[in-house]
Image (spheres, rainbow, N blue to C red):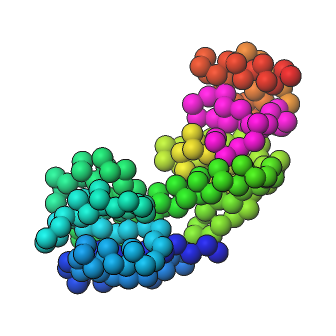
Amino acid sequence: MKKYRCLIIDDEDLARELIETHLSQLDEFDIIASCASAIEASKVLQQQQVDLLFLDIEMPVLKGTDFYKNLIHKPKVIFTTAHRNYALDGFELDAVDYLLKPIVFSRFFNAIEKFLATQQSRNHSTDTQTSDKSHLFIRENRKQVKVIFDDILYIQSLKDYIEIHLKNKTHVVKYSISAFEKQLPTTFKRIHRSYIVNISKVTAYTNHDVEIGNREIPISENYKQSIQFIKE
């Protein structure tokens, strides 16, 4: 299992301890340091590789947002703060998320899921440059689960989640359908805002829908061109 290296930066001892406690419940993360100031953290970053920062915004001497702007090599960042009015600053810096103190675990876990989704997408893009993969791993119930592309019938979007339908099983994962689409081989086509189908599994089709087994899946007007791929 890949371990992600985290650095916690916050001038409040209790705030750092809470993040440490939350991270201790997740197997994928190692805390390499916990710093009380941006100056202290900069020394750590000069010496060690960091994958994810938990960075407080309102700190003495140097604000977290200013510190992050000045980094040459920017790890992914989750901003933490007691002040709602800093949210825009955080997202303008392409933050993974913005957590308001006191940080409850459910909200913290949601931010972690967003980070892991970005890493999974990036890692897959790197992999596909060097080889044709027959599978991918998805995060489900805190485990990395292997899914064979040829086993997938179709994918359905449900707001912040997707359902990956196999013949005898369905995986539900927190992912956007657009991001997941980028990881699929060319045998998969988007036929609707909410649906991607495995063309090799289509048993019948009309101008308005496709059939996979006993399931009818609609084709939207914006994706009519997908029918041409099915005909081929």
Magenta span covers which residues?
181-202
Decide whether residue 193 is among the magenta residues.
Answer: yes
Tell me, yes or no, whether the highlighted magenta stretch contains residue 47: no
Left or right, 43 with reference to 200: left
Tell me if residue 25 can be seen.
Answer: no
Tell me which residue sits at (26%, 63%) in the image: 67
Quadrant (top left/top right/bottom left/bottom right) for the C terminus? top right
Q: Where is residue 37 drawn, in percent x and y?
A: 23, 76
Image height check: is 165 above or below 36?
above
Closest to the observer, 2 or 114: 2
Q: Residue 216 in the image: x percent, y percent? A: 73, 30
User: Residue drawn 43% across and 74% down?
Assistant: 6
153 sits to left or right of 9: right
Q: Is residue 162 above or below residue 39?
A: above
Q: Quadrant of the N terminus?
A: bottom right
Lateral position of residue 83 relative to residue 25, left or right: left
- Closer-to-camera residue (148/78): 78
Q: Is residue 183 visible?
A: yes
Instruction: Answer above or below: position of 62 versus 209.
Output: below
Where residue 155 sits: x, y (%)? 67, 42
Which image quarter: residue 22?
bottom left
Q: Residue at x 61, y 63 (%)?
A: 140
In the displayed structure image, the side of residue 17 where residue 58 appears, left or right: left
Rendered image quadrant of residue 68 = bottom left
Quarter occupied by residue 13 = bottom left
Q: Position of residue 107 (x, y in %)?
A: 36, 64
